[in-house]
Image (cartoon, rainbow, N blue to C red):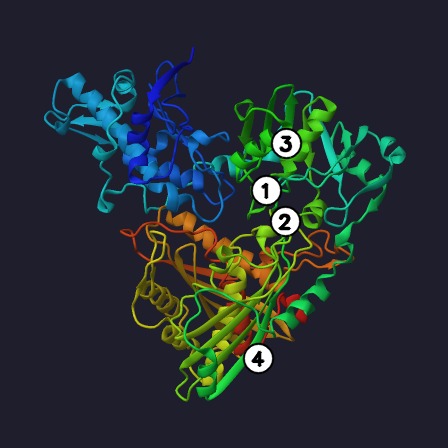
Amino acid sequence: MSKIQQINRRDFVKLFGLASGGILLGCNLSSDKKEFIPQIEGVFTPNLFIHLEKNGNVTLIASRSEMGQGIRTSLASAIADEMEADWKYVSVKQATGNAKYGNQNTDGSRSVRTILEPMRKMGAAAKMMLITAAAKKWNIQKVDCKAENHFVINTLTNDKISFGNLVDEAKKIDVPLEETIQLKKVKDFKYIGKTLKSVDLKDFTHGTATYGIDVRIPNLKFAAIARCPVTFGTVKAVDTSDAEKTAGVEKVIELDRIVPPVGKFFGALGGVAVIANNTWSAFQGKLNLNIEWNYGENHAFNSEDFQKKLRKRVRQKGKLVIGSSGNINTAFTKSEKVIEATYQVPFLVHAPMEVPNATAWFQENKIEIWAPLQDPQTARAELAHFFEIPIKSITVNVTFLGGGFGRKSKSDFVVEAVALSKKINAPVQVVWTREDDIKHSFYHATSVQYLKGGLDNNGQVLGWLQRVGFPSIISSFKPMSDYASGLELNQGFTNNPYKISNFQLENIRAESNLRIGWLRSVVHIHSGFGNNSFVDELASTAKIDPVQLHLNLIGKDRVVKGKSKFPYDSKRMKEVLKSTAKMSNWGQSLPENHGIGVAIHYSFYSYVATAVEVSVNNGKVKVENVWTTIDCGLALNKDNIRNQLEGAAIFGMSIALYGKISTKEGAVEQNNFFDYQMTRIKDAPKIHVAIMDKMHEPPTGVGEPGVPVIAPAICNAIFNAIGKRVRSLPLIDEGMV
């Protein structure tokens, strides 16, 4: 039988570091006492994240979602390091979606930077309790004991007791005061900062990992949903006769659009759902539906016309953004040369290898779901809101994600599954097709930006004017939000890495006719492309080496303190640039029609510099080499960091070479990977990664910072190879792929 241990508010604060402003990791403290840590017979569970059994096995709880970025291994290693656990005894279990685990939202490259220290404290607290238990057994002082490699050692006699043999005694020990928890010094790290094999490697390589699409429960039905081609369109009439005759189809159901309240949640698009006894039959039945749609007000939306509109608007004065400085008009008047350029990025879609899917079972007064989710707590809250079920009666089981990139932090596909389960009174799995995924997503916004720069005789940049327009993410929560928010503009625009005396940023109106959402590196894709492309153009005009101009613009060493605990340090930006220049042998002699381009960017509090070598033959571009240096502070797992930067290079190449979502008469024109292409293995370049040694700095983001530099570095390399400027993505539209 399981017993529930009562932990009062004071002890909770001591354990989870709330008093020192740490991340809230635990239950919702709406009362002084909460029952939240199950005490299982023969198991030591000092907190929500550690389960030590008598046989020595340690199960560590992963509160963040695993989508290939290695977070389960990284955070587990931090706990194990401080606990002095032997890695061979460690396994990881995925947490369900629940506020008691703190913020579980796995996006924004935030997992390590926000919860590494609390996770270390979890392990250190458990180690202290095990040492106390051993000292009691030996009747000696705690200072005469030390933990090492899954044992507590008596330093007076060299006797030792395994962690497993201390379980019963350790369960009786009080949780240590937060201020008494001592973390390891960097020199003593055993796992942190090293290269560790993934705890999930066997499941990944043997095909035994359970993704959302793999879930099977008794009496499960399968559903496919036909949605209106135009965003927020509705069903006018439907003929279901052909669909109902499809082998395996059991019924056809109309599904109303579920409209979220202003300011939060995602709702669901609605449409016509085909219920079948297998996925294939559901897909075939959907194809046999005959639907007449009410297309609604977005029917007139044409992305090409919209981009023309934005290009016209950026040539006119926009809304002045706070953060501008100096006087650009005076700067341009004094300039020897004035350069102007307009850059454009199209709509993009995530297209993770595993399409959106969810399995749901609605049973009277409770809901259980199984899904690949980046943000299980928002999904849980959304279900409680729409279906009027107490949140405590909703269980969200988080599976592995076959990629996410931000798409699976939106829970519309989960809402669909629960709505259908309620209607048919049975468990159901909703699976999107690839066409559904591409045609009905939350899209990364298109952008147009105009830049104007002034140079003096020495190539010094005297003035920098930048106007940018893109549909805001806020529009998905608050309709009619047609200007980018300050939060979005703070992603590489108001906080670009340069020191420019006369700087002006303007924001132009850009209405939304599609659902807008965040995609890996978000607005940094726009700012990284515009800033780095323009610096390269300024360097060419001034006849200055681009690396040198970047260094000139970064300026003298300075630390800019903002509201976060991660100040911008220009010295660190220069260091990664110099590292990449050295690694790529910048300035080397290259074969004919080869060129190297460089780009830098500061995002998610990390510093990245990338150089890319391309060759251009018969007008076609091939990426030959990518060199990237990152300074992400403390490097928790270097293997994961390399993997992330290699993946970012491929992801960024896909954006630069192929990425484009377009609409005509309101409908997305792309369908599948034949017309929304990805970088394939045959096109993969040699990728070289350097990680700066900054183990004494706090950790910063890794998953996203490697993306924004790739497209501009490629385009700058093309210019250096053949003298052609590319200001509009993707290259396939330029006939260069």
* Mark 4 vs 1: CB contact within 8 A: no
Q: Earlier in the sequence, mark 2 or mark 3?
A: 3
Give above or below for 284 relative to 195: above
* Mark 1 vs 2: CB contact within 8 A: yes
Residue 442: mark in rendering? 2
Q: Residues within 10 Å of mark 4 (few under 14, many from 20)?
A: some
For numbered disc 3, what is the local secondary structure? Answer: helix
Q: Tell me where residue 156 appears, x and y as whole percent.
A: 10, 26
Gap in Å between the C-alphas at discs 3 and 1? Answer: 15 Å
Gap in Å between the C-alphas at discs 4 and 3? Answer: 57 Å
Residue 386: mark in rendering? 3
For numbered disc 1, what is the local secondary structure? Answer: loop
- Amino acid type, callout 4: Ile
Residue 410: mark in rendering? 1
For numbered disc 4, what is the local secondary structure? Answer: helix
Give above or below for 340 relative to 488: below
Left or right: residue 201 versus residue 154 is: right
